Image: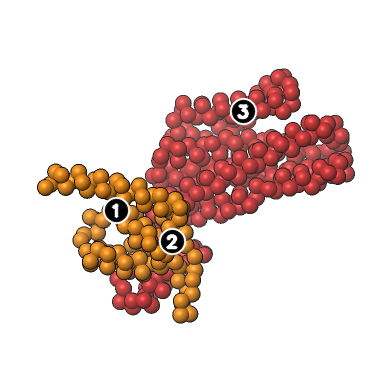
Chain colours: A red, B orange
Amino acid sequence: MSFERTLQVELDRVGIHGALARRIQAELADHRRCDPEAPLGDPRELAERFAADLRAPLTRRAARHGFAALALTGLLLVVVAAVYSATDQWARLDVFGARGAVVAAGGLAIMIGAQVAFVTGLLALAPLVLGRSDQASLLLTQRRLAVALVSASVVIGAELTQTVAQRPLLPGWLVVPSMIAAVAPLPVLVPAAHTLRIARGLTPTVPVRGLFPTPLLAAVAFAAIAAMALGSAVVEGSAAEGLSRGAIEAVAIAGCFALFARPLGLRR
Amino acid sequence: MRAESLKGHLDALVLATLGDEPLHGYAVIEALRARSEGAFDLAEGTVYPVLHRLEADGLLTSSWSTVAGRRRRVYRLSRRGRAALGRQRAEWQSFARAVESVLA
């Protein structure tokens, strides 16, 4: 088998596919045109070295971009909610009939999706902030980030659905900005998801259980509950609203912990 | 020079090689060999994963160029890469002075 063909098989084996594999092949082909006798080494070792060298920086990049997408999604969600409150749009919304069902389902998806995205996004950053770059920590970051990005996508989809469903009831000046605010994070979110997919392919599956320190877990949960309670109290101008949403956040975090604790490495 | 001796220094060497001008992978290896007067005779395939990693870390940027009908990937230092090179040069000079003062 030729060097190129063997390298292709080995790149595929270590999880390097598509454009990245084609780029590596093209660079090495150019190298061999410069020097046909060039000692490029064993294709298996070369492919493994690419995977080992790329999995950590690509995971870090996906986490940075992913967190930026999550932050932008959250920020725009808060801005839109604040505009709705300031202009008294909530009172106009139809909460009955088919349209009301869509709006209610969208609202639930936004509430749950945003909370899951927020918490898992923070959790995804934790191993990187702690300076861990072993395979288990990278895998944890990738799994948490995947959950966070899927949740953010659910929020974006629900925002769009809600806006479309309520379109006849909203003032014209609010419809297009609401839609733009919903999809604005996509140019950051989609590349982050793409990078994450590549990084995941390069990272072998290893045991990840129990790698997260309990005090940090408690701190993240507390930060999420506090942010939800304070944010809601400020946006809605009501301490009672803040407390009730903080309580919902606490229930949501407990539910997420029960569902995702093992795959996300939160407990043994 | 043994490849193991270069471990931990290869990133700085590659960054330094790209400090003066953008180069493609083969030219980076040739420049390393020439500037070290043949001392750094690396297994050539090992440089490409380093170039990809440095780019993924934002220290290099790269783009395709066509030379005499051949497509090649040309690497150049990013602003972050130039800053990293400055830091690594300073660290190396400090380390080399300390070793020299002990061994001399």
Say few, some or many: other residues with alpha carbon within 10 Å of mark 3 (under 14 / 14 to 19 / 20 or more).
some
On screen, residue A200 above or below A162: below
Which mark is nearer the camera, 2 or 3? 2
Q: Residue at x 77, y 35 (%)?
A: A83
- The tag on residue A32 is none
Along the polypeptide, which appears first: circle 2 or circle 1?
Answer: 1
Residue annotated with mark 3: A227
Which mark is nearer the camera, 2 or 1? 2
Residue annotated with mark 1: B9
Say few, some or many: other residues with alpha carbon within 10 Å of mark 2 (under 14 / 14 to 19 / 20 or more).
many
**Going by the picture, which residue comes out furthest to the bottom?**
B68
Amino acid marked by disc 2? Arg
Give the structural element (helix, strand or loop) at label 1.
loop
Q: Chain of mark 1?
A: B
Q: Chain of mark 3?
A: A
Q: Position of residue A142 (x, y in %)?
A: 50, 46
Q: Quadrant of residue A129?
A: top left
Q: Position of residue A180 (x, y in %)?
A: 73, 47
Residue contact between numbered discs 1 and 3, judged by CB atoms under 8 Å: no
Amino acid marked by disc 1? His
* Front residue of this view, candidates A243 and B84: B84
On screen, residue A150 above or below B60: above
Say few, some or many: other residues with alpha carbon within 10 Å of mark 1 (under 14 / 14 to 19 / 20 or more).
few
Q: Chain of mark 2?
A: B
Q: What is the quadrant of the C terminus of chain A in the image? A: top left
Q: Residue at x 56, y 39 (%)?
A: A121
* Front residue of this view, candidates A76 and B30: B30
Q: Position of residue B59 (x, y in %)?
A: 43, 53
Residue annotated with mark 2: B76
